[in-house]
RNA sequence: GCGGGCGUGGCGGAAUGGCAGACGCGCCAGGUUUAGGUCCUGGUGGUGGCAACACCGUGGGGGUUCAAGUCCCCCCGCCCGUACCA
């Protein structure tokens, strides 16, 4: 076929025309089913894309994320592995409830309708999911196991209820986990979060703080470094000591936590968190009114204001004194809001010389400042700049002359002897606040009985199914809408059979997503949350693909769940995700797409215009997976053209007479084919998908050239190249690949084909280009055999005209030979 | 503040310490075509030169090295995380 005729074909090729054909073919063939067959000897691979929230149809962000995950899954299918690549929906949550309230429908209706929309969009997008494993967290068959797991956590003391300050979102009318508060604002609705004292359920994630921290080492090099860093910072381990201070006129001492026990002799005052019970307890009676006034003033502040480091320090003297345990010194006790009630012990010893916050406070209230660590810096009392670094201890009795590290060791020893202190660690991580006062979630399986107290729902009564509440008021009023379902709330106590009431809160939806990758392994299993054997076969997940916005929340919770399941003997690994890729965002004109900016790009319209394959390929080729893609810079037309080139090669080859075995084909093209396949393989394995596409393009160009001005379309090497092109392209452009695969005479589907095998003999080059440098600058090049001897290469290089010219008038002092690629002649 | 990451053509981006700019977009030219589009071929970092070629060039400055986009130090800019955690 001539180029002109090819052009005619190209004009006719429109990938959109073949989408329906292959979608129904795939539905028939079901080629992406993972098998549990014991006789299946294929290596298993488990690849999970973070499951979507069904908030509407799929958008551009999904298009990128799932294009990446799908390319990797398809690669493993072609490598002949038993691939588990499932999909599900994270289907509980506030948006469904808010939408239902807005539209006067039921959250379930809204949710299931969106799930169907997304499911059909996923099929159109040619994702290689095992649809038989589909799950939805809002199904009772799923959330009953949330409840079951909650009860196991409860039995182990890992789920408990207590009073505490919580983050309360006044708009969503619910509490939020610390992880859901983004710089003082509700992660969901953006409202400013306020603090409230409430009785709530918690998961004791802090008990796993050390393991969550230490096990990040297992993930080193396999997870993005920044995610590991964020997790470590979030856990926030610090080491120091607890020190007891007696309080004048009180029987009970108060313990403080400090990372700098070495500076104990420099403590000149004592501060407790104003809004902790401790402040009231310590406060002298004639100062209680003043304290109450101060607390009221503090509580008026938003978290944002409170946390601002710019703000001037405030506080009140409580009219009592603490006694420094090492030198008996009386130091005044203050209450202030710069000390947090829920970190450490809620009380600190203030060492203004060596802590900036204490120094600011001391200067504001004219409190003494005593330097106990000598540094090269100027006196903090004069400069107003604390010296928190290393130095030699002074004014510190037995610590004088010691370094920071030895002083810490020494003072801990002294305190321990007297029973007044000990080494201690602290974490920023707080327990996971679980309760939500909303409807669309998993009911907490606890019954409150007036005589028996908190009674767990017996396993055989699970699931505790959400009451329908259809047609009823779901608008939150500070208590869960479930409280209104009288028939549901009032139950018999499982212990004493007396009248009792159900807990009306629902669980944070992050519980749902903490273990769904376990559920996929045996999605219909009814004997427990998952079949332990199935999990043993598939987990841990080999590759997890999703957005970095889950760097702490979801990923920390999943890791926590996995460790608890390990302790329960339900799995034999401690980390759920062996590898993690965070894909970038799809933005438009430099900004995140949003309704308010009006810069949203509709995925459906893009697909109508360019076809699925071109959109997928655009996403993949645009940048490395982890980088953002600015859609305004993209040109999907280029990918439409590229797909046309592939299609034309297939039609040209299909129209040519059948070729003999590949070995009889044009050697030059064969070498290019095998080298490019080898390159693509390595790039895909390294997740450099954009570069893999670039290599594919090179192979397409070489093949086009071979057809037009080389051995022609009937050559066996051209056919071999065409097959390889289509196989590689199938990772990114499944529709075009299928159509071409069929044109090339293969059956029944490219998804059932095998990744091309490279012949090592064709990968070895018989000539390589050697660069000849003089003083590091390229002056000539020569073609040499790859095995050229160093001495020979040196002589050849020195004799090169370009080198000789550059060496004129110079004396060669040294020749660096890196055979066969480079010679550098050093001359002066 | 603190912690981390990133700065490469007009643009998206390549480059185990060894030819900077692969591949693509865009642009320029040629071919095919009645024409446009499509398709095919070639060119395309900057400066100078008809050319061969030379010099400059990976945010700026210094260093290590035969050799630096890559490693080290300082500075500038942008992005992300975190935010009184004692």
Image (cartoon, rainbow, N blue to C red):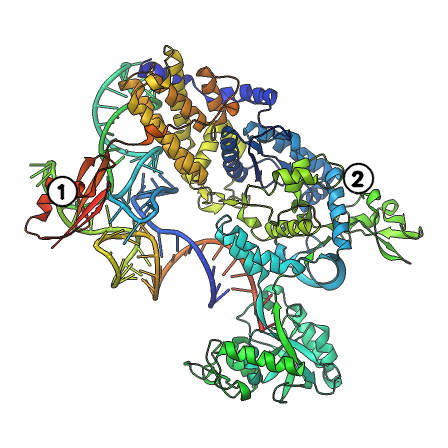
Q: Is residue A420 above or below residue A31?
A: below
- List the single residue furthest toward the left: A809
Q: Identify the residue shown where x is 42% and y is 80%.
A: A377
**Between discs 2 and 1, the one toward the N terminus:** 2
The front one of A649 and A667 is A667
Question: Percent x, y for residue A199?
Answer: 77, 61
- List the single residue furthest toward the top: A657
Q: Is residue A799 above or below residue A653?
A: below
Q: Identify the residue shown where x is 34% and y is 16%.
A: A713
Question: Percent x, y for residue A428?
Answer: 61, 64
How packed is label 1: few (under 14 Cα within 10 Å), some, or many (20 or more)? few
Mark 2 against mark 1, which lies toward the viewer?
A: 1
Separation of residues labelled 2 and 1 (CA atoms):
89 Å
Q: Is residue A739 found left or right of A469 in the rendered image?
A: left
Pointers 2 and 1 within a single chain:
yes
How packed is label 2: few (under 14 Cα within 10 Å), some, or many (20 or more)? few
Question: Percent x, y for residue A109?
Answer: 72, 35
Helix, strand or loop at label 2? It is loop
Residue assigned mark 1: A795
Q: Is residue A357 found left or right of B8 in the rendered image?
A: right
Q: Is residue A55 found left or right of A449 in the rendered image?
A: left
Q: Can you say which quadrant of the picture contains the N terminus of chain A? A: top left
């Amino acid at each position: 076929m001539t180029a002109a005729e090819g052009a005619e074909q190209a004009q006719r090729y429109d990938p959109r025309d073949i989408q329906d054909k292959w979608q129904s073919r795939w539905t028939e063939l079901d080629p992406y089913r993972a098998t549990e067959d014991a006789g299946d000897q294929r290596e298993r691979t488990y690849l999970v894309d973070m499951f979507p929230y069904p908030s509407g149809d799929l958008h551009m962000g999904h298009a990128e994320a799932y294009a990446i995950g799908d390319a990797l899954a398809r690669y493993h299918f072609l490598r002949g592995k038993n691939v588990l690549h499932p999909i599900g929906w994270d289907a509980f949550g506030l948006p469904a409830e808010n939408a239902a309230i807005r539209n006067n429908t039921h959250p379930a209706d809204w949710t299931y309708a969106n799930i169907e929309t997304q499911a059909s969009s996923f099929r159109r997008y040619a994702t290689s999911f095992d649809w038989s494993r589909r799950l939805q967290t809002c199904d009772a068959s799923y959330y009953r196991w949330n409840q079951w797991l909650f009860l196991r956590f409860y039995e182990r003391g890992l789920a408990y209820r207590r009073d505490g300050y919580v983050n309360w979102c006044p708009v969503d009318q619910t509490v939020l986990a610390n992880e859901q508060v983004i710089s003082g604002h509700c992660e969901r609705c953006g409202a400013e979060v306020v603090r409230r004292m409430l009785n709530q359920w918690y998961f004791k994630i802090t008990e796993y703080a050390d393991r969550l921290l230490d096990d990040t080492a297992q993930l080193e090099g396999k997870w993005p470094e920044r995610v590991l860093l964020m997790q470590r910072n979030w856990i926030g381990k610090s080491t120091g000591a607890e020190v007891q201070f007696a309080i004048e006129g009180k029987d009970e001492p108060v313990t403080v936590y400090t990372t700098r026990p070495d500076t104990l002799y420099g403590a000149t005052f004592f501060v407790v968190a104003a809004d902790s019970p401790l402040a009231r307890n310590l406060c002298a009676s004639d100062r209680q009114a003043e304290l109450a006034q101060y607390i009221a003033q503090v509580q008026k502040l938003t978290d944002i204001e409170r946390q601002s480091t710019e703000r001037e320090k405030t506080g009140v003297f409580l009219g009592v004194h603490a006694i420094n345990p090492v030198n008996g010194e009386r130091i005044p006790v203050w209450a202030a809001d710069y000390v947090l009630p829920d970190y450490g012990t809620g009380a600190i010893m203030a060492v203004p010389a060596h802590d900036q916050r204490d120094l600011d406070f001391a200067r504001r209230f004219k409190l003494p400042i005593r330097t106990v660590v000598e540094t090269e810096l100027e006196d903090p009392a004069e400069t107003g700049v604390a010296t928190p670094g290393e130095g030699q201890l002074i004014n510190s009795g037995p610590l004088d002359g010691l370094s920071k590290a030895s002083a810490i060791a020494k003072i801990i020893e002294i305190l321990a002897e007297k029973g007044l202190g000990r080494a201690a660690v602290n974490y920023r991580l707080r327990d996971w606040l679980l309760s939500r006062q909303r409807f669309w979630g998993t009911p907490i399986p606890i019954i409150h009985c007036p005589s028996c107290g908190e009674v767990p729902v017996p396993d055989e009564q699970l699931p505790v199914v959400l009451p329908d509440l259809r047609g009823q008021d779901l608008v939150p009023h500070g208590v869960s809408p479930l409280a209104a379902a009288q028939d549901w709330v009032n139950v018999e106590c499982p212990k004493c059979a007396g009248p009792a009431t159900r807990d009306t809160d629902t669980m944070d939806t992050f519980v749902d997503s903490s273990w769904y990758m376990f559920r996929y392994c045996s999605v219909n299993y009814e004997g427990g949350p998952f079949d332990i054997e199935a999990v043993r076969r598939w987990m841990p997940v080999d590759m997890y693909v999703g957005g970095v916005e889950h760097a702490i929340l979801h990923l920390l919770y999943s890791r926590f769940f996995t460790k608890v399941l390990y302790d329960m003997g339900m799995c034999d690994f401690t980390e759920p995700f062996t590898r993690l890729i965070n894909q970038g965002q799809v933005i438009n004109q430099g900004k995140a797409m949003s309704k308010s900016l009006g810069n949203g790009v509709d995925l459906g319209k893009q697909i109508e215009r360019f076809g699925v394959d071109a959109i997928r390929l655009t996403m993949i080729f645009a940048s490395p997976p982890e980088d953002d893609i600015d859609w305004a810079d993209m040109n999907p037309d280029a990918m439409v053209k590229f797909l046309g080139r592939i299609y034309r090669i297939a039609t040209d080859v299909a129209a040519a007479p059948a070729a003999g075995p590949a070995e009889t084909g044009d050697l030059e093209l064969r070498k290019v084919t095998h080298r490019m396949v080898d390159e693509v393989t390595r790039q895909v394995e390294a997740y450099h998908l954009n570069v893999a596409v670039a290599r594919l393009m090179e192979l397409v160009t070489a093949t086009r050239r071979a057809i037009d001005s080389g051995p022609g379309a009937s050559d066996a090497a051209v056919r071999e190249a065409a097959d390889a092109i289509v196989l590689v392209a199938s990772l990114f452009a499944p529709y075009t690949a299928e159509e071409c695969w069929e044109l090339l005479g293969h059956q029944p589907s490219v998804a059932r084909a095998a990744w091309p095998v490279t012949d090592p003999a064709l990968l070895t080059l018989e000539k390589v280009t050697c660069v000849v440098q003089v003083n590091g600058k390229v002056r000539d090049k020569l073609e040499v055999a790859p095995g050229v001897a160093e001495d020979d290469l040196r002589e050849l290089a020195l004799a090169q005209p370009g080198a000789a010219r550059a060496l004129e008038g110079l004396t060669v002092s040294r020749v660096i030979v890196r055979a066969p690629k480079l010679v550098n002649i050093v001359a002066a």
